[in-house]
Amino acid sequence: MFCAIVAGSVPAFTVLDAPEGVGFLDTRPVFKGHVLVVPRTHVGQLSDLPPDLLPGYFGLVQRVAAAVPTALGSQGTFVAVNNVVSQSVPHLHTHVVPRTKGDGLRGFFWPRHKYVNDEEAASYADRIAVTLA
């Protein structure tokens, strides 16, 4: 699925498209504006990512983590990578979740907050993409 998003054959609410990877909204966000960053090269998990790709990939993650609070007015972000366990798609992806004190996120129980419609999702993607530009 993520390879198809990277290739452009499956639509996504993209916030960042760079040689090192792609950032797009999670379709089942913990909070609205939850971004997934994936490397352009298919790898199953973090330990499979070639060492020479680490700086570029995590540079993208860092950029998204900096942009999300500015774009959405959150106080910070939660950044996480699952490897195999709790990894719903077998393609390395890093979650960048907007956080605000008192938002209700506790430990690793992640309630999901759906977008009302595609237009709302697109507005979140656009706000983050503009901040990243």
Image (cartoon, rainbow, N blue to C red):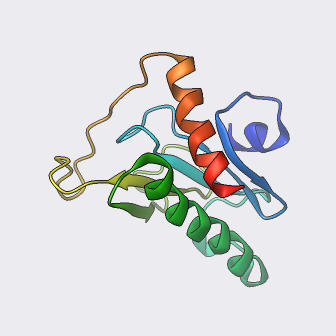
Q: Is residue 17 above or below residue 76?
A: above
Name the outermost residue toward the top. Answer: 117
In this view of the protein, which residue sits in the foreground, 50 or 20?
A: 20
Q: Is residue 68 above or below residue 28?
A: below
Percent position (x, y) of residue 83? Answer: 48, 62
Q: Residue at x 40, y 51 (%)?
A: 86
Give the quadrant of the N terminus: top right
Q: Can residue 48 be seen by looking at this rendering?
A: no
Q: Is residue 64 above or below residue 129?
A: below
Percent position (x, y) of residue 104? Answer: 16, 47
**Count of residue discs:** 0
Relative horizontal placement of residue 77, taking residue 83 as reference (left or right): left
Percent position (x, y) of residue 36? Answer: 56, 50
Q: Residue at x 79, y 59 (%)?
A: 41
Q: Quadrant of residue 82?
A: bottom left
Q: Residue at x 61, y 55 (%)?
A: 37
Q: Quadrant of residue 126?
A: top right
Q: Residue at x 42, y 17 (%)?
A: 116
In this view of the protein, which residue sits in the foreground, 52 or 78?
A: 78
Give the quadrant of the C terminus: bottom right
Q: Can residue 88 be seen by looking at this rendering?
A: yes
Percent position (x, y) of residue 131? Answer: 61, 53
